[in-house]
Amino acid sequence: MYPVYITSADMGIIGITSIEAKIFVVTPSSEYIRSRIMLAYNDVHIFVSP
């Protein structure tokens, strides 16, 4: 697993407006990342790259 930083644009796509994000995913698949981001967001596991 490695950290994936999402951009402001990504945040807009998934509906996240907070600037706290850092998720750990296995593959760079957009949909996978989106679902993981939502799960991580609920558990406050994310960090977002500006």
Image: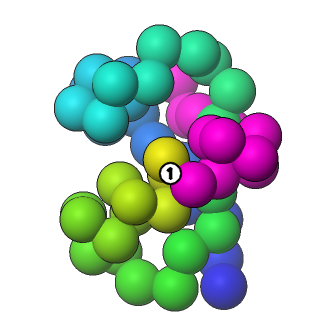
Q: Residues within 10 Å of mark 1 (few under 14, many from 20)?
A: many
Q: Residue at x 75, y 47 (%)?
A: 43
What quarter of the picture does the N terminus occupy?
bottom right
Q: Is residue 46 visible?
A: no
Q: Is residue 13 visible?
A: yes
Q: Is residue 27 above or below residue 5?
A: below
Q: Is residue 36 above or below residue 40?
A: below
Q: Verify whether residue 43 appears in magenta.
A: yes
In this rendered view, identify the residue nearer to me: 35 or 48: 35
**Left or right placement of residue 9 versus residue 1 in this view:** left
Circle 1 sits in a helix, a strand or a loop, which is it? helix
Q: How is the image coloured?
A: rainbow
The percent coordinates of residue 28 (x first, y second) are 35, 75
Q: Is residue 14 above or below residue 34?
A: above
Q: Residue at x 47, y 14 (%)?
A: 17
Q: Residue at x 62, y 18 (%)?
A: 19
Number of marks: 1
The percent coordinates of residue 41 (x first, y second) are 62, 41
Q: Which quarter of the figure has residue 35? A: bottom left
Magenta residues, start to end: 39-50
Q: Verify whether residue 23 appears in magenta.
A: no
In this rendered view, identify the residue nearer to me: 41 or 8: 41
In this rendered view, identify the residue nearer to me: 47 or 34: 34
Q: Which quarter of the figure has residue 24? A: bottom right
The percent coordinates of residue 16 (x first, y second) are 44, 24
Q: Is residue 20 above or below residue 41?
A: above
The percent coordinates of residue 7 (x first, y second) are 40, 33
Question: Given the image, on which type of amino acid does mark 1 rest?
Answer: Ile
**Left or right placement of residue 30 versus residue 38 in this view:** left
According to the image, label 1 marks what residue?
37
Q: Which quarter of the figure has residue 33? A: bottom left
Q: Residue at x 58, y 15 (%)?
A: 18
